Image: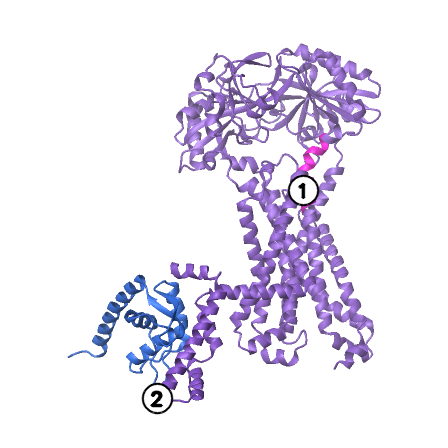
Amino acid sequence: MMREWWAKVRQAWSRRRNLADLRDEIEAHLEFAREDNEARGMTSEQARREAARQVGNKTLLEENAREAWVFPRLESLWQDLRYAARGFRKSPAFTVSTIVTLALGIGVNTAIFSVVYAVLLRPLPYPASERLVWLGESTGKAAGISVTWLNFEHWRAENRSFEDLAAYHTGDFTLTGRGDAVLTHAGLVTSAFFKLTGSRPLFGKLFSTEDERFGAAPVVVVGYEFWAHNLGANPNILGTTLDLNGTAYQVVGVLAPGPKFLNRPFDLCLPLGPHEDRLDRGRHGSTRVLGLLKPGVTLAAARADLDQIMRRLDVSDPSTEKGHDAYGEYLIETRTGEIRPTLMLLMGAVLLVLLLACANVSNLLLARSTERVREFAIRSAIGAGRARLARQLFSETLLLTFAGGAVGVAVAAVCLRVLQHTAPSDIPRLSEVSLDVTVLAFACAVTLLAGLIAGMAPVNSASNLDLTRALKEGAPGAGSGRRREALGRLLVAGEVGVTVVLAFAAGLLVRSLLIAQTAYPGFDADHVLALELQLPPGAYTNGDAAERFYFNLKEKLRREPGVEAVGSVNCPPSAGDCGDWWYSVPGRAVPSREDVPLTLTNIADADYFRTMHIPLKAGRDFSDADRAGAAPVAIVNDTLARRWWHSPGEAIGQEIKLGGPYNKGPLLQIIAVAGDVSQLGLDTIPEPEMYSPFSQNRSGAMVVMMRTAGEPESLARAVRRDVASLDRNIPIQSLKPFRSWLAAPLARRRFSTLLLGVFAALAFVLAGVGIYGVLNYWVRARQREIAVRLALGAQSSRVLAWAGSHIGRLLASGMIAGLAASWAVSRWLSSLVFQVSPRSPSMLLLALAAVIFIAALAAAMPFWRAVHTDVVGNLHDF
Amino acid sequence: MGRMSTVDDPRESLEFLQGTLEVLILRSLQIAPNHAYGISQFIRQQSENEFVVDNGSLYPALQRLLQREWISGEWKMSPNGRRARYYKLSALGRKQLAKSQSEWRRFVQAMSRILEPQQ
């Protein structure tokens, strides 16, 4: 009843006055009764006594009436909490260790969950983002390759599954004519792209389908960041032109600040439309398609729909592309697919850490409740029900866990800050991570869960209290001692198991990282300075100009003191996959369409292999004779050569056909076999790779490598000067020692390994504390027994063996459980380890050894105490 | 709620039905404002000593009625010059009493139809 409830709330402020009124009223009542009694002829003494009897127990009367003013349940909770707080203040060591343990567990969980939520779970910031899909084409071998323009047009016109489709790809354009040349990152997009990503103009307009038409005047929409930082936030920018790769684009609009589509936002958006070289159905570029599914249409149905269109095209336009299907995945999965296993592993790890924290707190509470057995016995003897006692224990636990939770959120905030500063920048959306409402709700839920888990054991053991025994014996350990010990042992065995799993997983990752970091990259990476350049296509449209520029630059660099050799490559080791293509070996069995092999493609100049110290296993280096017009040649890597020939020597003089049997492509003569390099990163297995000579395949985008006598950085200034002296308008993409190129792809591995290592360390500490606690209790409870044994002449070693066998049994059962769990977990680890078996027995042994070591450390103190038991003192106490 | 005590009466005690004490209080105040002792005397006399109100039930019931704003309390002088808290029926309480009376009537009729059917 609302009115009554509200009155209670209001009365909370005027209880003192209400109580005074009530007392006065009862006094008056007494007087009335006495007067009546006198009127009935009693003596005044008789009347007073009779009145008092009629009124009854005044205090109880007050109590009863007061109950109407309050919320009895709430008040008793409040009472419990106050009582608990008093108890906690009296045992600060217990309180602090409990709260710190919980705060660690809850803190790391909250921090990692906030990352998982922001990166994996939170919907993308686009309208109807749950229906956005990413589309590509797939062949038998490769899924998600680019969509050709013609296919896209047919998809767009003929599909029945999408509300809209937008094509996009990225391109780098050099902006000139506004001070120093700037390399911009542009998105070439169809007009629907803006709609699908919810982009709006800050001012001006976005493209229309008119702007996509072939031959339309070139226009550009400027991204907000680029407009603000590079174009001086010029409000009069509309109508002016930007010179991009030598073409003047008219600015028609500026985008409002908004969600970024990709990790790296577009500086500019240019219209994407049909183009003469896009009218070949087999001509792949890097175009991908974004689609908005109609409500209720599944991705599978949409793919089937697009596949049907592809089948029709196969018939009407039979080309080399026959048999391609549509490929699609939800955008959110595309964005986060790669990081998912890592984050799930970390989340799993912190949950285990939380379990450990709960087990420890549970143990602490158990120990405490055992010491309070007398208190509970007395309370239950004077009438507290079991439910009432359980409720009190739970309120105590809740108070503790919520204190732990509050500190935990603070811990999480600190962890998060550290995470954001140490995490590699390629984790999508990491900058968006924050302790928002969802995360705090999670923290609350975790805290509650922790409280329930940790509170279960003590409540359970307290409500099974044997009253008589507890009151009689009264010593710590009496009453529920045995039971409490069994529970404690179970908890510690569980802790040991969990720690084995974490140590095993962390060990695997650390081992992988060490292997990767010290892996030989296939060349000498020290004392190399790498200069990354991308010549603006406007000024360097023909290959001759690019070749002349690089020739002159290398001549200049070679003359710098301290430079020993200069060579250049299009795609340096660890830069990843800059391009791959089908190939085949003429004379060998023709593979089916689905089985055409792929090779990475690369471009190197004549000095590259020598400069990098990449060994040539056979054959000769590129030379000046390998000119445009001369016979096309290639150097292949060891992996490719081994696939077809027994020894590198046999490969020399053989030919490979680029494009494979079904696509156009040149026939290349193999002139050398180079050693494998870590093209895709140090923690990868080499893939087949093929280099063509720069002189036959001139590119504007090259990384110039300089082998230096001293520290590579010392040359940076001279290098910049040399580049500028040749052409002011060339932006330097990067200039850094090559070691940092190698380290970059390992950043993520290093990050996840570090985190898992920290969590494993945390687990060790928690398990150590847990073992210490249980063993310490075990020894204390047997102090007298030990004293008797010692008094009867037992050697210290016998006592040690006794205690040791106790802890040994405990460890053994925990470790067996841990081994089984590790075995089960290893399946999920296989995608994260490198060159270590995810079921590596030596790693398992190492994890066990580490746990035994921690257990030994934790046991040292209780053992020492056991051996040094005060025999006389204990025997006197009998 | 309350229980009828058998202080002066040797017969078995009758228990107040849930909520009936409140109705009896309201009814006693319908006649004139009264203090707690007066209310308990009124109920006892009117019921011819069948109901003896336990003070342990009376005071909480009064508090509940105050909270529901069915009655209000005011400190006044009694005719014999004693300061006492007088309770008065509010408009809301009057309405509630009328409702309870008709409900009671239906309840009694239904009960007696079952317990003492007229053949």
Tally the marks.
2
Would residue A7 be found to the left or right of residue A255 on screen?
left
A479 vs A84, nearest the viewer: A84
Q: Check whether the beta carbons of the residues at disc 2 and disc 1 lie within 8 A of each other.
A: no
The image shows residue A420, relative to residue A170, as above or below, that is: below
On the same chain: label 2 and label 1?
no
From this viewpoint, is residue B18 visible? no
The image shows residue A432, relative to residue A806, as above or below, that is: above
> Residue pushed farthest front?
B81
Q: Residue B69: image x %, image y %?
A: 36, 62
Q: Residue B108: image x %, image y %?
A: 24, 74
Chain A drawing hue: purple
Chain in blue colour: B
Q: Quick one: label 2, few (<14), some, or many (20+) residues within 10 Å?
A: few
Identify the amino acid type marked 2: Pro
Find the magenta span and give its range: A741-755
Q: Which residue is mark 2?
A: B10
The image shows residue A52, relative to residue A301, as above or below, that is: below
Q: Residue B79: image x %, image y %?
A: 35, 75
Local secondary structure at mark 1: helix
Q: Where is the N terminus of chain A found, in terms of image quarters?
A: bottom left
Task: Please report the residue visible at 79 percent of the width from the left and 73 percent of the height from the top.
Answer: A869
Q: Which residue is mark 1?
A: A418
Q: Residue A802: image x %, image y %?
A: 75, 71
Would residue A848 be found to the left or right of residue A29 on screen?
right
A56 vs A156, nearest the viewer: A56
Local secondary structure at mark 2: loop
Q: Chain of mark 2?
A: B
Q: Is residue B97 magenta?
A: no
Task: Please report the residue visible at 54 percent of the width from the left and 68 percent of the height from the top.
Answer: A390
